Amino acid sequence: MAITASQVKELREKTGAGMMDCKKALTECDGDMAKAVDWLREKGMSKAEKKAGRIAAEGLTRVAAQGNHAVIFEVNSETDFVAKNEQFLHVLDVLQASLLETKPASLEEALKVSTPEGTVEEVITNATATIGEKISFRRIDVVEKKDDEIFGTYMHMGGKISAVVVLKGTQDVQIAKNIAMQVASMSPVYVSQSEIPSDVVEHERELQMQMMQNDPKMAGKPEKVLQGILKGKVDKHFKDLCLNDQEYFLEPKQKVSQFLKENGAEAVCFIRYQAGEGIEKKEENFAEEVMSQIKG
């Protein structure tokens, strides 16, 4: 199939690989973007893991806890300027109070929640009209804890990143907040390796195995040695994805799990939001925009 320039551009943005490498990867994989990312990783040409979470939209997230419930949500705007606007911040304040009180189970339910200024959907619609940019309520999660557990919440840069964690075995507010800061800053995906789905682990094993097979340094090594190297590579890949295995940001020589154990605590779960993650920002072509206005 013919590979388009836009496909090459998209793959380059995702991986940081060179233009010709991206075109070759897409050609080899018949235009399949996911397979092309893996192909580039196998060939050592990709920086995908560092770029995968690239932020491409504006807005803010919020997190708040009350009693045994916490709510974390995201509202998007078109520009960062509007995200700092007092009207936009007021919208988040209005939504936070009502969402925390009602604890909606889904995005659909959240949009119907009543606030002092109308339903959430109406508040968003009115904000779009008054602010002059498209404002959207993107997502929400409600977290519940047990009586003997504790919430830790943290917002970074006014809500560019928000995190909520649940700990058990401690009621220390500072410890809980520190772990929320860990989640916000280090972006774990799982609490521990036992949570990683088997198909995800198997996919990584296959990918690392293919990369080893393409590595001349691995030729001639005994099978037992190769299996040990493979396990080490897979474990290393997942180490930074698991909260318990990460280096504790306040004491890098110590793992998070060790810090928690010393304090009689254990991480139960967490949720991390980063404003705009996974959304591709529309790129404006200034010349085309000017020409369209002249013609229009």
Image (cartoon, helix red, strand yellow):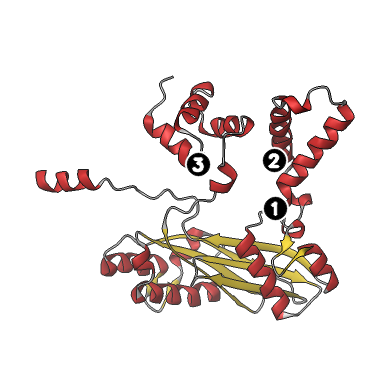
Residue 51 shows in the view: yes
Q: CA distance from mark 1 to mark 2?
A: 15 Å
Give the amino acid type for the residue marked by disc 1 in the picture. Answer: Asp
Q: Earlier in the sequence, mark 1 or mark 2?
A: 2
Query: Residue at coordinates 76% horizontally, 59% vertically from top-left?
Result: 244
Query: Residue at coordinates 57% horizontally, 34% vertically from top-left?
Result: 45
Front residue of this view, candidates 100 and 245: 245
- The x and y percentages for residue 50 are 57, 48
Hey, which quadrant is residue 188 in on the image? Answer: bottom right
Front residue of this view, candidates 197 and 39: 39
Q: Earlier in the sequence, mark 3 or mark 2?
A: 3
Query: For the view shown, which residue lies furthest in the front direction?
Result: 217
Q: Secondary structure at mark 1?
A: loop
Q: Name the side, left or right, on which 119 lies relative to 128.
A: right
In the rendered view, would you say 265 is above or below 76?
A: below
In the rendered view, would you say 10 is above or below 60?
A: above
Q: Earlier in the sequence, mark 3 or mark 1?
A: 3
Disc 2 designates what residue? Answer: 200
Give the amino acid type for the residue marked by disc 3 in the picture. Answer: Lys
Find residue 284 and name its label: none
Q: CA distance from mark 3 to mark 2?
A: 19 Å
Q: Secondary structure at mark 3?
A: helix
Find residue 240 and name its label: 1
